[in-house]
Image (cartoon, rainbow, N blue to C red):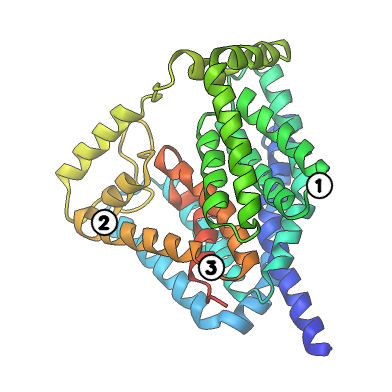
């Protein structure tokens, strides 16, 4: 009994650190919206996260000391490549490096140290509704008062909690989960970007193909429902989107994503030019690359993870690391532990964003996904 209680308590410390980071990201967005940036709040948030990390370090070092040291060493070596190549902008490099070694790597190893992953899933669900409410208020207030056309970061933040609720619904069939999913989905559609929609489509496909939550009969039923919805959408595409756009504008949203779905579905927001620019930069320095968090393109980061690997590590090491990552994702899909599998489906679906947006160096989802992929299979 004592061993069980100790294991349970240590797993709770690890889960608190992982989920606490994402929850305080949501709280942080609301506070900054209402009060702006001020040092006191920043110190408070960092202090709380430091306490959560310090408490999580106890089981991390006890259970995965060598793994933790190895991951941190590899992370430092990857970032130091940029330093030795002389390709750093301190304003970008320093916070990216600091977050990687103090938050993202400990987060990944925290999952590796977990004995019972269901505790983490339950903790994510516990904070899903509070995070959803905070993010919904933040997005509505921001777009209404600051004339922002849409919020890409807000859409992706909502996406995590949408998928947590959707996964929980598949487990419990709770009507409250459906309500939460509808609220999050409409906010993403009305005020977010198109990227989260790709992630949601990936989540549906992954659940139909790989979920251990769904029996064959349930998969067939969900497939028929989705096929019916797709047929209705195909037949009444313009009417449905026009109706949703009217609702969005009545509530003060721009409905940018809906407008693009109606008028210019292939609009790339300048990404194609960015791909060409980074392809040219790769051609200039093909062997070693430029290192991580060293963006010389006019559009910031490359907006595509394969190009980012080539740009950061060169045309030899870059493809090797990219294929290794793909191999780890496949390994993650083959998880036999149901709790690990459910969490990985959420993380993998969000990782679809790396095809069109985001950079892995600043994404906790990327590092946490690595932790799930590399966890020993039960």
Q: Residue at x 63, y 84 (%)?
A: 62
Marks 2 and 1 sit apart, C-alpha to C-alpha, by 43 Å
Q: Quadrant of residue 112?
A: bottom right
Which residue is located at x 24 percent, y 32 percent?
276
Would residue 1 appear left or right of 128 to someone viewing this image? Answer: right
Q: Position of residue 4 (x, y in %)?
A: 79, 84
Callout 1 secondary element = loop
Compared to residue 277, the image places residue 375 above or below, namely below
Where's residue 246, x and y in %?
66, 10
Q: Relative to residue 200, is residue 46 depicted above or below?
A: below
N-terminal-most mark, 2 or 1? 1
The residue at which mark 2 appears reads as 319
Indicate the quadrant where residue 313 lies: bottom left
Q: CA distance from mark 2 to mark 3?
A: 25 Å
Front disc: 2 or 3: 3
The C terminus - image quarter: bottom right
* Residue toward you, 296 or 181: 181
* Nearer-the-camera pick, 346 or 54: 346
User: In this figure, which residue is indicated by the disc labeled 3?
Assistant: 335
Tags 3 and 1 in contact by the CB under 8 Å rule? no
């Amino acid at each position: 009994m004592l061993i069980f209680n100790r294991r349970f308590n240590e797993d709770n410390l690890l889960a608190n650190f992982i989920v606490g980071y994402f929850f305080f990201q949501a709280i942080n967005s609301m506070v900054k919206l209402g009060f702006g940036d001020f040092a006191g709040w920043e110190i408070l948030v960092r202090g709380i996260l430091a306490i959560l990390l310090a408490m999580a370090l106890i089981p991390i070092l006890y259970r995965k000391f060598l793994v933790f040291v190895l991951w941190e060493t590899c992370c430092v070596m990857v970032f130091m490549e940029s330093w030795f190549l002389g390709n750093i902008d301190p304003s970008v490099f320093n916070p990216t490096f600091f977050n990687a070694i103090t938050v993202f790597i400990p987060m990944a190893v925290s999952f590796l140290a977990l004995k019972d992953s269901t505790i983490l899933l339950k903790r994510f669900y516990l904070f899903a509704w509070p995070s959803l409410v905070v993010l919904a208020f933040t997005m509505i207030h921001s777009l209404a008062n600051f004339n922002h056309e849409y919020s890409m970061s807000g859409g992706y933040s909502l996406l995590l909690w949408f998928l947590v609720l959707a996964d929980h619904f598949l487990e419990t069939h709770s009507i409250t989960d459906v309500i939460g999913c509808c609220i999050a989905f409409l906010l993403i559609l009305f005020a977010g970007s198109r990227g989260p929609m790709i992630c949601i489509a990936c989540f549906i496909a992954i659940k139909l193909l790989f979920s251990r939550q769904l029996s064959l009969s349930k998969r067939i039923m969900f497939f028929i429902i989705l096929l019916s919805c797709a047929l209705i959408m195909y037949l009444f595409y313009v009417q449905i989107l026009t109706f949703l756009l009217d609702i969005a504008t009545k509530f003060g949203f721009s409905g940018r994503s809906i407008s693009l779905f109606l008028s210019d579905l292939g609009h790339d927001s300048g990404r194609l030019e960015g791909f060409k620019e980074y392809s040219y930069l790769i051609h200039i320095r093909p062997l070693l690359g430029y290192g991580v968090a060293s963006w010389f393109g006019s559009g910031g980061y490359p907006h595509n993870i394969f190009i980012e690997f080539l740009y950061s590590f060169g045309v030899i090491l870059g493809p090797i690391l990219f294929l290794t990552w793909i191999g780890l994702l496949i390994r993650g899909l083959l998880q036999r532990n149901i709790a690990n599998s459910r969490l990985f489906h959420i993380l993998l679906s969000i990782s679809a964003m790396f095809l069109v947006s985001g950079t892995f160096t600043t994404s906790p989802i990327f590092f946490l996904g690595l932790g799930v992929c590399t966890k020993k299979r039960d």
